[in-house]
Image (cartoon, helix red, strand yellow):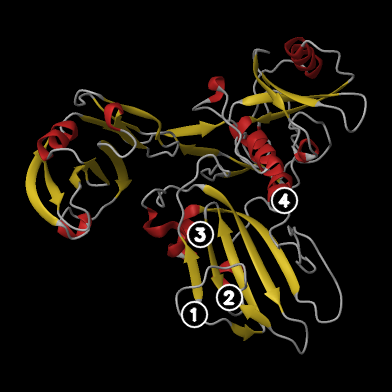
Amino acid sequence: MTMSRQGRAATGMTAWIIVLALTGCGTGPGARTGGYGDTRCRTAVRGVLPASATLTTSWLPAGFHQSQQGQSATAIPTVTYLNAARQPNGPRIMLNASRSTEPLNSAAVGGRTTMPVTIEGHPGLVAIGPPDPDFLGVYWKPSRGYLLSAVGYRVPASVVVRVARHVVFRPPGVVTLPLASGPVIPRPAAIAAARRTVRSRWPNARASLSSWTEISALLSFSQRTAVPVPADLRGRPWRPVWAVLLTGPSSTARSSLVVVDAATGHPMTTRPAAGKWFAALTDRAAATGRCPGGSSARVPFGVLTRDEETYVTGDAAGPSGPSTTGPGSTGPSTTGPGKPKLTVRLVLSTIPAVNRADPGLYGGCVQVNCSLDQLVWVVITTVRAAPGHTVQCLPPTASYPSGYHPKKVRQYYSVSVPDNYGIGCGPLPGRWRKLKDLAPA
């Protein structure tokens, strides 16, 4: 039995995803460092990621305004407009875009009662009726690959249609991630800029060349809470930056993180940053004599290195996780009679490859473009019972469907990507064993 959970595409997130192209170091533009960096990598991974789409409307009824939390940060956004005069359960209008190559019909809008309408020259449908008559949606396809909708709650149909006819939608583009830092200010200059920013005599200072994508992933994991994106980095969190950690004279002293633009020396944000997360941050300016980040492949700024991914998935096995073995593995370990054996393998793969192995992980690729060769860190976990013992599957940490009774098996596995995971009761299928690691240890 295999269980899959579908989640919203992340952005952030926690895991950034990139397009693959491998080249030998020193054999092409991707191999040149152009600044700080170690050239002793066997391969280099070029990368892109989806830029955010544009979704808005040029007309709203009087009294409506965009909600402060009403726009998602995903590549394909959703937008909510509220009527401030009638809160908290007052009228609202929601815009949504999703990837879809299916024809527009009543099945595509949930089987509700529909009426035809034309939106900017494109055939559309107005969906009304159950399950909630307070909701009314207008659906249309501006192109073969996208489905747009304007949904009103306690809003007249004529108003929702007029909003839909003024919707502006630009599909997400593609951003090339920097493989090299380019010209950057020296490390001492970054530390000096950070000291001037906090205006304090911090005796200890460390600086790592990184990106906000990596910094926020490690910091959020350490503090168990999401870290807001600085205004200067919104839309471009992959830009090379200096992360400067200033600390007091003792291990218990206060600390402060200052993020400095690597090219200009301009301080972008300052925040408390206690914890051991900084030691796990890959310094891409360090001349270590090896490929930075714990693998034999260089990855672009804006992509977690293997060392960083190991840090943020270090407790993937859970507090009682048994021994972890194998190249590229991570996780806690325990030993003793009767203890199951757990192995956690980290694989940098492409979304198309992962989708071919298990289409359920991306839920039909509505929010993730499975035709774009994006990279994603995959966490593959296997649990094997000790000789003469069994393990429970699904495990206690999983969400059971109604009526499901866990069974005793010799082994089970789980596969996790950002916001999604699947569990199988039995040996790890060959499609996962054969998944190529593009940034091996």
In the rendered image, which quarter is residue 179 located in?
top right
Q: Residues within 10 Å of mark 1 (few under 14, many from 20)?
A: few
Mark closer to the observer (3, 2): 2
Mark closer to the observer (3, 1): 1
Query: On the image, numbered disc 4 is attached to which residue?
Result: 310
Give whichever of discs 2 and 4 has the lower sequence position: 4
Q: Residues within 10 Å of mark 2 (few under 14, many from 20)?
A: many
Give whichever of discs 3 and 4 has the lower sequence position: 4
Q: Position of residue 222 (x, y in %)?
A: 71, 42
Give whichever of discs 3 and 1 has the lower sequence position: 3
| Residue type (three-letter) at the residue carrying disc 3 | Val
Query: On the image, numbered disc 3 is attached to which residue?
Result: 354
In the rendered image, which quarter is residue 42 located in?
top right
- Spatial separation of the CA atoms under disc 3 and disc 4: 19 Å
Query: On the image, numbered disc 2 is attached to which residue?
Result: 394
Query: Label 3's element?
Result: helix
Give whichever of discs 2 and 1 has the lower sequence position: 2
Mark closer to the observer (3, 4): 4
Query: Which is nearer the eye, 61 or 237?
Result: 61
- Spatial separation of the CA atoms under disc 4 and disc 1: 33 Å
